[in-house]
Image (cartoon, helix red, strand yellow):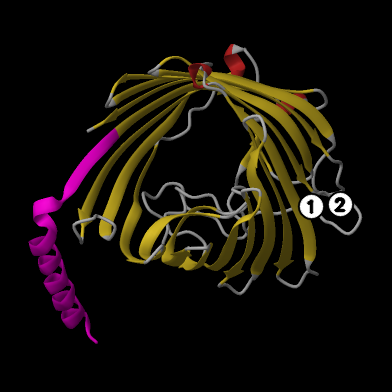
């Protein structure tokens, strides 16, 4: 099929789509201003002012009266520049990125008490642990909801903007940060997930397998198997526990096995919508049969200056939220982190981090946010970080 024929087919489809759904198309946008002061310590020569501005436009068009089948898309422009407080320090160039964050067709059909949904296009996908694969990709998701839930996903990362997604891959692949849009590394992604609902006492048991396979001469293949159990406990408590075993094969190296285990215990109160959550995370280092755990999408476990990811780590902490008034949400968190000593991987060190924040929904379409946080390392001063963030979001 030549290019001319493909263009004609696309034009016919586009016109047909607009003609049948233009009367019910919804659209909107978002303006996001993120102003952050951050650095290694409270010192003029250690702080920078990070200015990030984002503008997004979205569209949604239903295919049926219920709105369960639809098309939706979103495009984003992002500007970012760092300004050192020290006038003699070198200043980084500004970055300007564009991205198609979302481009998805959804087709849903209810059959009795069950529901079948097929999603096609570019959209966000997360693994069961929410710490291994958390990013957009282009692909197809088939899901079934009934007495048990299961889903199958197949995707590709090579058409994404590599400046807008952080894939942990080989050092030989480098994205050009000076380009507005530079293609990400090429991986085929496959995910299969099943949820056994209410296996006992309203507890849900989930199992998932995921594989990511690099399409390059220098291979970097990763596979993950995850089990999760979650549900309510007496006295208004909720819990969740998961364990992920990762298998990593980099080029000609031997396969390495790592483990990521997470748990949380939450309590929700009717008083001012308050909640409190205890959480713990273990990401293997070089211990027993395990090697350092390696995820796929960079996911920050500790907000240090180097933004450590989930590897060679034990992390435990507490998070609390409350709404003093209906449109103000206040959050605070405290964590203790212990990084293992792994030869050739990381230096052993311990640290604490805390964060205090408030989000004020000034109007239905205006949100103001203020956050302050600090990470203090007991062993490596270069890991220390302080940050203060002012955020404003306008939707229309």
Up the image or down, 219 lies above or below 96; here it is below
Nearer to me, 105 or 248:
105
Residue 107 occupies quadrant: bottom left
Up the image or down, 182 lies above or below 357; here it is below
Q: Provide residue 263's location: percent of width, then percent of height.
A: 71, 41
Q: Provide residue 258's location: percent of width, then percent of height.
A: 78, 57
Question: Which residue lies at the image location 61% right of the left edge and 67% below the top edge?
Answer: 211
Helix, strand or loop status at disc 2: loop
| Residue 48 in sight here | no
Q: Within 10 angstroms of label 2, few (less than 14), some, or many (20 or more) residues? A: some
Compute the Cα span from label 1 to label 2: 6 Å
Question: Which residue lies at the image location 88% right of the left edge and 59% below the top edge?
Answer: 289
Does label 1 or label 2 sit earlier along the sequence? 2
Residue positioned most to the right: 288
The answer to whether marks 1 and 2 mark residues whose Cβ atoms lie closer than 8 Å is yes
Q: Within 10 angstroms of label 1, few (less than 14), some, or many (20 or more) residues? A: many
Q: Which residues are magenta?
A: 1-30
**Main secondary structure of the magenta stretch:** helix
Question: Which residue lies at the image location 65% right of the left edge and 67% below the top edge?
Answer: 220
The quadrant in which the N terminus is found is bottom left
Nearer to me, 96 or 124:
124
Residue behind mark 1: 292
Identify the mark at residue 286; answer none if there is no mark. Answer: 2
Residue positioned most to the bottom: 1
Nearer to me, 145 or 31:
145
Q: Provide residue 110's location: percent of width, then percent of height.
A: 34, 65
């Amino acid at each position: 099929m030549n290019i001319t024929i493909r263009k004609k087919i696309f034009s016919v489809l586009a016109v047909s789509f607009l003609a049948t759904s233009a009367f019910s198309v919804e659209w909107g946008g978002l303006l996001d201003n993120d102003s952050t002061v951050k650095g290694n310590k409270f010192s003029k020569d250690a702080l920078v002012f990070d200015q990030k501005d984002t503008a997004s436009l979205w569209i949604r068009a239903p295919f049926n009266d219920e709105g369960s089948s639809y098309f939706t898309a979103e495009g984003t422009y992002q500007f970012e520049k760092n300004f050192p407080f020290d006038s003699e320090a070198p200043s980084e160039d500004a970055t300007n990125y564009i991205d198609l964050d979302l481009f998805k067709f959804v087709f849903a059909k209810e059959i009795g008490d069950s529901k079948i949904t097929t999603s096609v296009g570019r959209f966000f996908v997360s693994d069961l642990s929410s710490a291994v694969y958390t990013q957009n990709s282009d692909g197809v998701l088939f899901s079934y909801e009934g007495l048990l839930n299961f889903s199958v996903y197949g995707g590709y990362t090579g058409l994404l903007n590599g400046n807008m997604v952080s894939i942990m891959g080989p050092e030989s692949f480098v994205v050009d940060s000076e380009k507005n849009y530079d293609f990400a590394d090429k991986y085929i992604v496959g995910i299969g997930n099943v949820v056994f609902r209410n296996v006992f006492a309203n507890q849900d048991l989930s199992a998932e397998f995921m594989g990511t396979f690099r399409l390059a001469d220098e291979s970097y293949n990763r596979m993950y198997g995850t089990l999760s159990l979650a549900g309510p406990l007496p006295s208004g408590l909720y819990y969740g526990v998961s364990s992920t075993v990762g298998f990593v094969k980099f080029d000609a190296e031997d396969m390495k096995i790592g483990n990521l285990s997470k748990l949380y215990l939450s309590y929700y109160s009717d008083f001012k919508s308050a909640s409190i959550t205890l959480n713990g995370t273990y990401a293997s280092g070089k211990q027993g049969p395990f090697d350092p755990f390696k995820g796929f999408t960079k996911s920050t476990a500790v907000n240090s200056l180097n933004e450590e990811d989930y590897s060679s780590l034990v992390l435990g902490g507490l998070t609390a939220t409350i709404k003093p008034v209906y449109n103000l949400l206040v959050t605070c968190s405290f964590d203790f982190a212990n990084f293992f000593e792994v030869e050739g991987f990381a230096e052993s060190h311990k640290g604490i981090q805390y964060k205090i924040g408030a989000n004020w929904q000034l109007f239905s379409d205006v949100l103001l946010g203020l956050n302050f946080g600090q990470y203090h390392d007991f062993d490596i001063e270069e890991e220390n970080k302080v940050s203060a963030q002012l955020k404003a979001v306008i939707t229309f």
